[in-house]
Image (tube, rainbow, N blue to C red):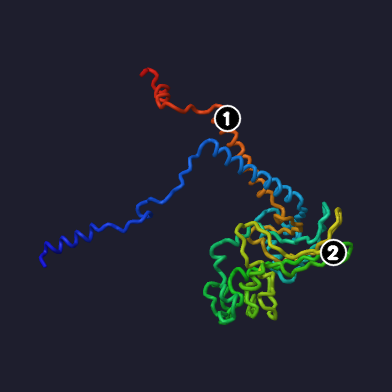
Amino acid sequence: MSSGDGVSQTSSKKSKKPQYSRFTQQELPACKPILTPGWVIATFISIGIVFVPVGLAALSASQRVVEVVERYDDLCIPSSKEDESDSNHERAKFIQNDDTNKTCVTTLTIPKKMQSPVFVYYELDNFYQNHRRYVKSRSDKQLRSPEYERDTKPCAPESMNDNKPIVPCGLVAWSLFNDSFGFKISNRDLPINRKDIAWGSDRRHKFGSNVYPKNFQQGSLIGGGKLNESLPLSEQEDLLVWMRTAALPNFRKLYGRIENDLEANQEVTVVIQNNYNTYVFGGKKKLVISTATWIGGKNDFLGIAYLTIGGICFFLAISFILLYVIKPRSFGDPAYLSWNLNPDMN
């Protein structure tokens, strides 16, 4: 075979056309909508008609929520110096001292009738659970199965204690919230149901029913609450709630439910065990009792957002009506445009 034959075969291969199809030749039917003023106006009006009623319903539901918020981190601590840095230092020493009595009592007045269930939350401010190193300091494999008990590499420095693995390991579990609340009405205990406060998926899948705490909070530095070593992690719902980290530095977490109605102007006595140390980083602690509606707790943002978007859409629709319906743009001879731009040419 000559070299010329090889070149001709190569060129013939390169020039081979692809197999014909409507897709490769871009002959498929296509939708090319033309946004006429009528379509734009109808679209904005439709969005406004949907969003405004939803916003009003969400805002109304949020306003029906009865909520009582009580800050107690400064209430449940002895008075200290005026200097803020010295004050936080003295408060931190008070909390870290095992010999001090950290019990305090406050009274909540119910503004309106609260129908059961009444949810009890604790709220923390200036606590960054979304910090990258904090969020990564856990071992999900260890939480699911005892086979991965020694999988503590992501948990350093809270990974091992006397060469034994810590279960659950990591800073998230180590900093478990450990304040407690007791409620009374007219010197009668008001029970709090602390079951089923965690996500069902966490109880069934994320935390193993055969994984038990080991060597937890037994080091020289204690971060927060302790766990019952006779109960599996899936049944210790305080831990499950805490381990679902918050996205913002100010957050609430569910503590329990009061399954009795609370009447208007009723006074509820709360006995607080103020154990959790937020004073070293200038954090705040609040106790929240709240009812709920179909949108959850009290949150005006959702309703305001829907109303804002719906209002903007109505405003734009009215603007288009004024511009293109009442004073429509002239169509027809293109010379009309050139005449208006260059009247000296005529």
Quadrant location, the N terminus: bottom left
219 displayed left or right of 23: right
Amino acid at the residue labelled 2: Lys
Determine whether 14 is above or below 209 in the image: above
User: Which dot, 1 or 2, sits closer to the camera?
Assistant: 1
Crowding at dot 1, Cα within 10 Å, few <14 / some 14-19 / many 20+, comes out as few
**Percent x, y of residue 326:** 57, 27
**Percent x, y of residue 259:** 81, 64
**Mark 1 or 2, nearer chain start:** 2
Q: Is residue 109 visible?
A: no
Q: Which mark is residue 192?
A: none
Task: For mark 2, give the secondary structure.
Answer: strand
Q: Which residue matches tag 1? A: 322
Between 290 and 181, the one lying in front of the other is 290
Between 317 and 77, the one lying in front of the other is 317
* Real-space Cα separation, disc 1 to disc 2, in angstroms: 63 Å
**Picture residue at 59% right of the left edge, 79% below the top:** 145
**Picture residue at 53% right of the left edge, 35% below the top:** 37
**Percent x, y of residue 212:** 65, 79
Q: Which residue matches tag 2? A: 184
Between 129 and 164, the one lying in front of the other is 129
Determine whether 30 is above or below 175 in the image: above
**Picture residue at 78% right of the left edge, 53% below the top:** 66
Amino acid at the residue labelled 1: Leu
Q: Give yes or no for contact between labels 1 and 2 (Cβ–Cβ under 8 Å).
A: no
